[in-house]
Image (cartoon, helix red, strand yellow):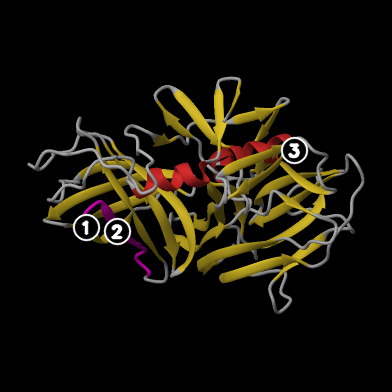
């Protein structure tokens, strides 16, 4: 274990698995389903919102979900089995659904949390977590007894995944990531925050390995392998976003006016685009709506690697919704712009631009850099976008 400026760093490949498998409780599961009705705050792939569980009968529950979209969808098929909770979020059109599964944690003071993964239209695996905004009603249960997991390791109570922290390295905002480039959350316990040693290794350029035979984390301060190293990400907001402009007024040939609205909401890995055209009489003549989820690109790739990104994108209506695309370009280029040297990401059949799409987009060719060179993998989302910055190191 390494301690660095108050943050203890250790291998959570084993520790995190133990915490999640015990529901962060370390006690035997209750024999009756707790009352989960009421409001919960939820983070789904870093987008935030709320769940309102309106009714519950035994282990079954239902309600509504609202996450960063200005809309409310139905929560159905809610079910509790032991400490496992499942439910479905469905859109009115019926073309989009998200299936959630996770672990329910209920503490003795009535506070509660849920965390797990969700898929979209049966594809992908994305993280989510929720906390109860008011204390729960606890059922009468037998006395709880401490438990010990296999291998002689003792689970701990009170540890939580902390999504409220941000990190800076040498003044630049950075995001800790795992082997697959997916952001990882630190764990807070008893006043101390713990971060995976592998994530810290990527940030600091250290070599991290695991010896399963001796159960030893191996840390070397060796020279990094030549290649592109992820440094940080940035969100780019379209200059005509409705939140800032209030809409753009236009005029038809006959003199009538209309107002176009363009808005992007959400955060990294989970983004929603909405567009609309409102006539002078207040009627919405056209509208567009798209939800895009994706996995982060890798934290490192070499001069011979072609990184790929898995995308789950659903377009419910495409008026004003431009095609989605990803490309590697100069770090100074914003989404929508491109240099002649940009390298696109394409589907297996060669498409660079997609609308509704579930699958993988891979960089079309590899690229070698020079020491200090900076590039960015850019996601274009209807004028909005996300930039993943990389630096070539040797």
Q: Is residue 199 above or below residue 109?
A: below
Q: Is residue 57 above or below residue 202?
A: below
Q: Position of residue 89 (x, y in %)?
A: 34, 60
Q: Looking at this view, name the residue that lies furthest to the right.
A: 370
Question: Pointer 3 and pointer 1: residues touching (CB < 8 Å)?
Answer: no
Q: CA distance from mark 2 to mark 3?
A: 39 Å
**86 on left or right of 160:** left
Q: Position of residue 133 (x, y in %)?
A: 27, 35
Question: Pointer 1 and pointer 2: residues touching (CB < 8 Å)?
Answer: yes
> Which residue has dot 2 on it?
86
Q: CA distance from mark 3 to mark 1?
A: 43 Å
> Which residue has dot 1 on it?
81
Residue in view at x 74 percent, y 54 percent: 336
- Residue bounds of the magenta highlight: 79-93
The residue nearer to you, when weighing 122 against 340, is 122
Q: Earlier in the sequence, mark 1 or mark 2?
A: 1
Q: Looking at this view, name the residue that lies furthest to the bottom.
A: 349
Numbered badge on residue 205 = 3
Q: Earlier in the sequence, mark 3 or mark 1?
A: 1
Look at discs 3 and 1 and give the one toward the viewer: 3
């Amino acid at each position: 274990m390494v301690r660095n400026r108050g943050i203890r760093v250790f291998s959570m490949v084993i520790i995190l698995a133990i915490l999640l498998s015990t529901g962060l409780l370390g006690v035997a599961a209750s024999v009756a389903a707790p009352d989960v009705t009421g409001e919960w705050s939820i983070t789904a792939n870093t987008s935030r919102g709320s769940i309102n569980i309106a009714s519950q009968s035994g282990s079954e529950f239902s309600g509504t979900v609202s996450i960063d979209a200005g809309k409310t969808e139905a929560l159905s098929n809610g079910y509790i089995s032991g400490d496992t909770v499942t439910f479905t979020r469905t859109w009115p059109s019926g073309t989009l659904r998200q299936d959630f599964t996770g672990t329910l944690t209920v503490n003795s003071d009535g506070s509660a949390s849920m965390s797990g993964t969700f898929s979209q239209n049966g594809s992908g695996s994305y993280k989510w977590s929720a906390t109860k905004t008011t204390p729960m009603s606890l059922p009468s249960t037998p006395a709880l007894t401490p438990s010990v997991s296999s291998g002689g390791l003792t689970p701990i109570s009170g540890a939580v995944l902390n999504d409220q922290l941000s990190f800076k390295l040498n003044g630049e905002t950075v995001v800790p990531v795992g082997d697959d480039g997916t952001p990882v959350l630190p764990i807070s316990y008893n006043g101390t925050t713990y971060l995976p040693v592998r994530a810290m290794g990527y940030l600091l350029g250290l070599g991290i390995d695991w010896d399963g035979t001796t159960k030893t984390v191996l840390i070397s301060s060796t020279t990094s392998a030549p290649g592109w190293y992820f440094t940080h990400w940035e969100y780019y907001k379209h200059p005509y976003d409705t939140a800032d402009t209030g809409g753009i007024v236009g005029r038809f040939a006959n003199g009538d006016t209309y107002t176009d609205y363009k808005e992007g909401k959400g955060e990294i890995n989970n983004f929603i685009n909405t567009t609309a055209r409102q006539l002078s009489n207040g009627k919405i003549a056209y509208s567009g709506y798209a939800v895009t989820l994706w996995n982060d690109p890798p934290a490192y790739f070499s001069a011979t690697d072609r990184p790929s990104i898995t995308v789950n994108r659903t377009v419910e209506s495409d008026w004003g919704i431009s095609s989605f695309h990803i490309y590697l370009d100069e770090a100074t280029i914003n989404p929508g712009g491109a240099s002649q040297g940009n390298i696109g990401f394409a589907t297996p059949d060669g498409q660079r631009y997609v609308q509704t799409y579930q699958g993988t987009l891979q960089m079309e060719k590899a690229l070698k850099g020079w020491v200090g060179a900076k590039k960015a993998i850019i996601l274009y989302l209807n004028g909005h976008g996300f930039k993943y910055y990389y630096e070539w190191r040797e």
